[in-house]
Amino acid sequence: MDSSDVPARAIAPFQVMEILSRAKAMERDGRDIVHLEIGEPDFPTPPLVVEAAVSFIRRGEVKYTPASGLPELRDALAEYYRERYGVGVGPERIFVTPGASGGFLLVLGMLLGPGSKVALADPGYPCYPNFVRLFGGEPCPVPVDDATGFHLNAESVRRLWGERMAGTIISSPANPTGATMAMPVMKELVDWVHERGGFVVSDEIYHGLEYGERSHTALEFSQRAFVVNSFSKYFGLTGWRLGWVIVPQDGVELAERLAQNLFISAPAASQIAGLASLREDNLQELERRRMALAARRDFLCERLERLGFVVRVKPQGALYVFADCSQLVPDGVAFARALLREAGVAVTPGTDFGCHETQHYVRFCYTAPILRLAEGMDRIERFLRRSPSRVGLV
Amino acid sequence: MDSSDVPARAIAPFQVMEILSRAKAMERDGRDIVHLEIGEPDFPTPPLVVEAAVSFIRRGEVKYTPASGLPELRDALAEYYRERYGVGVGPERIFVTPGASGGFLLVLGMLLGPGSKVALADPGYPCYPNFVRLFGGEPCPVPVDDATGFHLNAESVRRLWGERMAGTIISSPANPTGATMAMPVMKELVDWVHERGGFVVSDEIYHGLEYGERSHTALEFSQRAFVVNSFSKYFGLTGWRLGWVIVPQDGVELAERLAQNLFISAPAASQIAGLASLREDNLQELERRRMALAARRDFLCERLERLGFVVRVKPQGALYVFADCSQLVPDGVAFARALLREAGVAVTPGTDFGCHETQHYVRFCYTAPILRLAEGMDRIERFLRRSPSRVGLV
């Protein structure tokens, strides 16, 4: 274990893992912890999805599926794109994957080679640069902030573009900010990158979890975009580990070959669960959950701002509030540690999401009922009152 | 889709996929096909495993687990190594993965960088070289045949060893030959590679499916070996997509970081299924299945030899007979195609497993009941009688 050129060694540990393991140790000692650190919806698997999976498993035939996924699930997803986005996608372009993680392995495996440079928003989802590194590529962070709605755009990518730039990964609604990218901004960016022969991977994992305007898929602007999505967030099937990707027509054959090698297939019962998730009666249940999340978001933003946090761009989607805490404390990491230790509230330090001013931020997930969010906010309020000098935090 | 340096593009399609899709088309046309091409046990999920998964799913809490797997499953696997192999493995060294495929991504992600060379038996499992390529490494095939029991050994690896050799992947029982590696051969090879600072990844996915002497884990010879295993074959849980890896103590921290990025976690219900699979009453059921497989193997080897195939090393494990067909026909690929078309029997061409004399071979899986294997053999017998000149095959 001392070889040098192994890209995986450049992967930094997530700070939140340390927070999480401390939180669990405190719980073992009998402390009550308000968990606002993990982006996992708290709703149970919808009953009709449970029943579909259970009857499938009871038949005993939980076998490999085709590497690209069950044909009926690919067909249902094609229909979903037609209905939701008005976009025609042939089912042969849809590949069912073990989570969006498997989706990123598949599309980045198709696109990257040694030295490929990829433009990424900073702050952004921290696995993007790690996936890029793993395939020998080089992540190129583009600082983003409230000036551009915490998103890339054609201008910021243009300034970076040069030798060996292979493409970009975009995401709207985004983690950690919940910010959505305006439709014309996305169109201009996608067009600009495609004109330069680059790829666009659009991470649409938070689609459906938007609280204003509905999200647009990158496929509305270009059928050359690669889309990654998942049943984890909007559909709430985290532990089932099921996602999908959509590749351009001329990528189908390579995606097929690569999926056969990377996964063999996605979990069979999860694919049956995914298929049931797309049923109209389930989508109605998801709509009720979405409205509950919208109420939580409003509650959390308002309480955080009253406490002295600054929410620079009100999140329009996803499950997160990325809150600037620099008016309260100088350092988000120390603040997150102190919040856990002193107030029993677990949050994620902004530095997990990049380098650009992230030390001033912490991320709150509204993946708990409002009463629990209120308990968390009350605890933070008492904690801030106890430490008015804000010096004892570090 | 025209970038050049993308290693995934070097991945060749599997011939068997063409066979499989032709077979399915023939079935849609009403033809009965004897499937001997896919290495998937035909037994259903054992009922007690079904029930464990069903009650877990019914609770609705199918959530992310820790990236390394459920602690109780890691503990149970540690206990399994103590009981089965007499080897002490701390549960912190065991990582639960989405199938053995996920296991290979994890360990090779930990070990490989651009240009890393890896010694591999040819013929061997065809995903090994593809995983190596994907991480920018270079597969180094070592021709093996009946002279060395179709396995690598210290001598053959020594002849190849040189600049940038990073390590080797071994597998016993092996795919496609079912050949097992003798204990002293494995020990000598593992020691030799470790002395040169190389890594050894031991693919033990067919452990438990052996019909003579029990297999030895590489961990019996060195705690520096990396082990990949799965619930798919011996435990029969293919479609659940669950595997595990064991890493050396000093690799634990890196494996943890990488698993968080690569997978987030393995499917939760599958982990519960895996845990139930390790129960003593289930192991007794698996023992009955193993004896049924042993009887199939004997039947298949005998019939194939009577038909004129040569089985150079009688398989001691796994699910396969790798049969030399060169006394019957000049070309295994053409033979496999003709067998499907003319006799309705699907087998895998040897060329899917490498280059070394593989054109003379086809692989038969005994993943069907004996009556069905007999039907397949009868069809092949009639086919060979109809085509005595063996000319019309190509």
Image (tube, coloured by chain):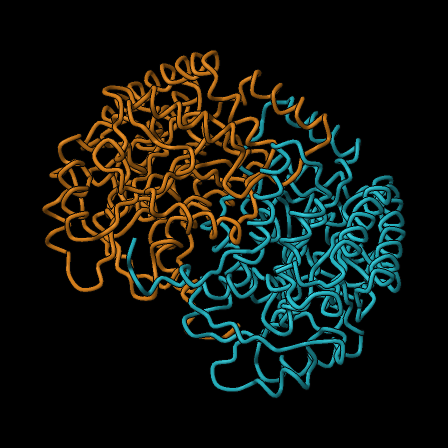
Chain colours: A cyan, B orange
- The image shows residue B76 at horizontal and vertical percentages of 45, 25
Q: How many labels does the image show?
A: 0
User: Percent position (x, y) of residue A303?
Assistant: 86, 57
Q: Quadrant of residue B130?
A: bottom left
The x and y percentages for residue B127 are 38, 49
Location of residue A155 with respect to A175 vertically, above or below: below
Relative depth, front residue between B95 and B313: B95
**Left or right: A160 in relation to B62:** left
Residue B360, quarter of the rendered image = top left
Is residue A195 shown above or below A260? below
| Image side of residue A372 versus residue B155, left or right | right
Point 13% across, 32% down: residue: B184
- In the depicted view, which residue is nearer to us: A77 or A317? A317
Camera-side residue: B382 or B180?
B180
Instruction: Say if residue B345 shows up in the picture.
Output: no
Residue A381, visible in the rendered structure: yes
Rendering coords of residue A161 (x, y %):
56, 85
Q: In this view, does A256 lie above or below B81?
A: below
What residue appears at the point 55 percent right and 61 percent down from the top-left corner?
A107
Image: A216 above or below A18: below
